[in-house]
Image: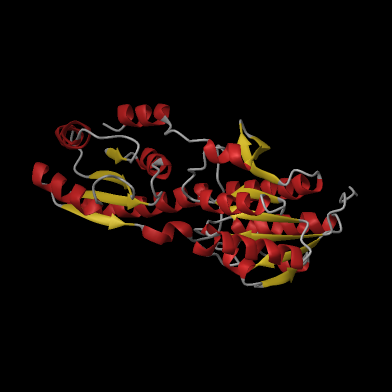
Amino acid sequence: MESNKGIRRIAVLTSGGDAPGMNAVVRAVVRTACANNIEVLGINRGYSGLINNDFHKLGARSVDGLLQRGGTILYTARCMEMLTEEGVQRAANNCRYLGLDGLICCGGDGTYRGALALSRQGVPCVGIPGTIDNDIGCTEYTIGFDTATNTAIRCIDKLRDTMQSHERISVVEVMGRRAGHLALNVGCAVGAAAILVPEREADFEHDVVERIRAGRINQRNHHIIIVAEGYAMSTQEVADKVQAETGMDTRVTILGHIQRGGAPSAKDRIQATRMGYYAVHALMEGRGKCIVAMQRGEIVDIPIEEALEMKKPLDEAMYAAEQSISI
């Protein structure tokens, strides 16, 4: 058994929007820590719980059955107090009061900024990317993305049946905040006629209306348009404009938070396990100011400051392929 190198007690929290696979992260962290004689505390409600000393002890048996559960047993919240010096100081003081040798934080950019602030106060922190948006610049993959993509695909496949029956256009909004990665992957997987994402300024006539007209001329009687929630126009505005230009009955479907729920996919369970295991070992090896990431299929760690500076561009090759094929 590997020595824990002086790490006696750590804590784990989930912060920001929930993502399928966060429970699998908690399980992996706890089991890895227990295997190395490290005590684990679960912080409830993210940084809010850390500020307010809301925690409970976790053991190997207390995380039984978490691998397949969606959501997060630790709950999650966005904590405005962590944007203040007073809030960060209270959180750091509580880490010292609890005798924590390290903190593992699963979430997105906001979670990482909190981890960076605590690291600067002397609290070793390791971040794990957990968000359905897949918008973390330092990593190719974020936990929850695969499950959310497949949830949206299943919903749209069902929606297509009724759209085809009524010869309608369906404009579907998917999540993703200010990023279009989820919309692009979903749109490619369902063969959408058009995909509208924040990263690209669409020529509405060419990129949407003409593609629908071309499909109709080629005997397609129904069409799916995918809109990312961060797109410049609202989904209803897109639908109204499409109906005005084509004369076809057009309906809006907003998938909403259903994309966050459900049992995590095999990919999310596996990557959550790998990243949780890696995060504990990073703390054990003294790398306590970093983000766990996937690069070229391998799990690595990157300094938090460097990770926060990195941006993730849209997959232009996928976008070009989808535009060519979905005609």
At x 78% / y 56%, what residue is drawn? 101
- Residue 312 falls left or right of residue 89: left
- Residue 170 falls left or right of residue 5: left
Q: How is the image coloured?
A: secondary structure
The C terminus - image quarter: top left
At x 33% / y 50%, what residue is drawn? 229
Residue 243, position in %: x, y? Answer: 13, 48
Residue 111, position in %: x, y? Answer: 56, 53
Q: Hey, which quadrant is residue 319 in on the image? A: top left
At x 52% / y 58%, what residue is drawn? 83
Q: Between residues 113 and 126, which one lies in front from this camera angle?
A: 113
Q: State whether residue 96 appears in this view.
A: yes
Q: Is residue 320 above or below residue 209?
A: above
Q: Between residues 53 and 312, which one lies in front from this camera angle?
A: 53
Count up the numbered dots: 0
Q: State whether residue 44 appears in this view.
A: no
- Residue 47 falls left or right of residue 233: right
- Residue 198 falls left or right of residue 111: left
At x 53% / y 64%, what residue is drawn? 81
Residue 123, position in %: x, y? Answer: 71, 54
Q: Between residues 231 and 156, which one lies in front from this camera angle?
A: 231
